[in-house]
Image (spheres, grey):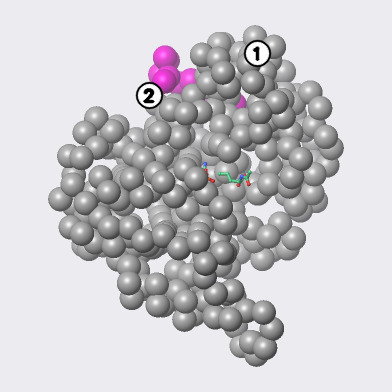
């Protein structure tokens, strides 16, 4: 594996989950692997979990980490080629990425979509240019369309908490007041479809009409716009808001009735409830669930360390760093 940007970089999903759980059992057991190599984390958008868990993962492997909040601390970047830079941007991604590659052995990048131009976002222009110019292995810390470190942690969490060989996992849309990316949901779907092919889960997606995700990520999933029906016998409910893909970046309704709470939980098989966080209480997810025994959200965030540690270990080994 040269870079880690989607589930397609995973050679063997089952083995990766097992390896992550082994690392979790002894997080410092591989402290010699990092060999004081440098991980650079570049954020074009805010983060709590991704930043801290990936730093922690690097520490556990004996790596050093440098973080830059490029949106606040760096120069304003130009992404377009062949432009005369007489506007607001100060530095071209060609130079910025190449320079970062001089200082770091592995680079992580967070680059959210602008949610205005679907073609631009779904071409992953920023991530791809960064990969092209930095010259070192790159880990996605959530790109315009995917959040693979999150989905890996989610699958680890499901494996740990499953009480049957093939649990039913439901991804449900939830209300929000701001237009959010489809990245977490696209990515979760892509990982669950792969897990379903390996008989690890049964996967269902539910959302109001108009919130269909891009087919490239959902192909193979059962999709049901009736949330009550979809939730029946669920073992895991994964809650997430996303803005419309078809009416790109739009919020289509207030989503009343779609918030997951203890009442809806009764439709499930006493399901465990997941969310990538940050979550808006009382809007996306009920306080009753978040404060109750069915919530896995904190545990799930904890597993981000072991997902990142597994990926960094594979990048170090695969690229002979
Ligand atoms: C982001 C999103 O939905 O992609 C990050 C989630 C990890 N969430 C918000 O912007 C609230
Ligand atoms: N779940 C997640 O990626 O959280 P942050 O945006 O805080 O990193």
Q: Quadrant of residue 16?
A: top left
Q: Quadrant of ligand 1?
A: top right
Residue 197 appears in the picture as rendered: no
Q: Nearer the viewer, residue 73 or 125?
A: 73
- 313 left or right of 251? left
In the rendered image, the residue lying farthest to the front is 73
Q: Quadrant of residue 107?
A: bottom left
Task: Give the residue pinned by disc 1.
Answer: 262
Q: Quadrant of residue 119?
A: bottom right
Task: Give the residue pinned by disc 2.
Answer: 160
Q: For mark 1, does the 10 Å Cα neighbourhood hold few (<14), some (14 to 19), or many (20 or more) residues?
A: some
Asked if 138 appears above or below 62 in the picture, the reply is below
Residue at figure coordinates x 56%, y 32% from the top left: 275
Distance from mark 1 CB to nearest ligand 1 atom below 8 Å: no
- 194 left or right of 286? left
Dot placed on the residue nearer the N-terminal end, 1 or 2: 2
The quadrant of the image that shows the C terminus is bottom left
Asked if residue 42 is among those painted magenta in the image, a careful observer would answer no
In the rendered image, the residue lying farthest to the left is 32
Q: Nearer the viewer, residue 66 or 139?
A: 66
Residue at figure coordinates x 56%, y 67% from the top left: 126
Which residue range is magenta in the image?
160-171
> Residue 93, image x and y in percent?
52, 76
Q: Nearer the viewer, residue 179 or 173?
A: 179
Asked if 146 appears above or below 264 in the picture, the reply is below
């Amino acid at each position: 594996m040269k870079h880690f940007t989607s589930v397609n970089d995973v050679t063997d999903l089952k083995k990766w989950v097992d390896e992550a759980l082994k690392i979790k059992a002894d997080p410092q057991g591989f402290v010699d692997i990092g060999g004081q190599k440098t991980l650079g984390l570049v954020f074009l958008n805010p983060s709590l979990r991704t930043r801290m868990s990936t730093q922690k993962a690097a520490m556990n492997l004996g790596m050093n980490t440098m973080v830059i909040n490029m949106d606040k601390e760096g120069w304003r970047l130009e992404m377009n080629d062949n432009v005369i830079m007489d506007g607001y941007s100060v530095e071209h991604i060609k130079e910025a990425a190449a320079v970062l590659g001089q200082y770091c052995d592995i680079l992580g990048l967070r680059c959210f979509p602008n949610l205005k131009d679907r073609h631009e976002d779904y071409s992953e222009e920023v991530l791809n240019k960064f990969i092209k110019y930095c010259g070192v292995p790159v880990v996605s810390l959530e790109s315009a369309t995917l959040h693979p470190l999150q989905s890996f942690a989610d699958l680890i969490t499901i494996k740990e908490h499953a009480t049957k060989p093939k649990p039913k996992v439901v991804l449900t849309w939830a209300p929000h007041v701001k237009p959010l990316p489809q990245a977490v949901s696209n990515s979760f779907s892509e990982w669950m479809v792969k897990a379903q092919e390996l008989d690890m889960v049964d996967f269902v997606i539910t959302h109001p009409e108009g919130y269909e995700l891009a087919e490239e990520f959902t192909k193979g999933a059962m999709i049901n716009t009736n949330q009550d029906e979809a939730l029946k016998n669920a073992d895991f409910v994964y809650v997430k808001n996303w803005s419309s893909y078809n009416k790109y970046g739009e919020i289509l309704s207030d989503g009343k009735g779609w918030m997951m709470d203890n009442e809806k939980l009764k439709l499930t098989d006493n399901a465990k409830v997941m969310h990538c966080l940050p979550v808006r209480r009382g809007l996306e997810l009920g306080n009753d669930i978040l404060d109750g025994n069915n919530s896995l959200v904190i545990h799930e965030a904890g597993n981000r360390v072991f997902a990142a540690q597994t990926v960094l270990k594979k990048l170090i080994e695969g690229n002979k760093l």
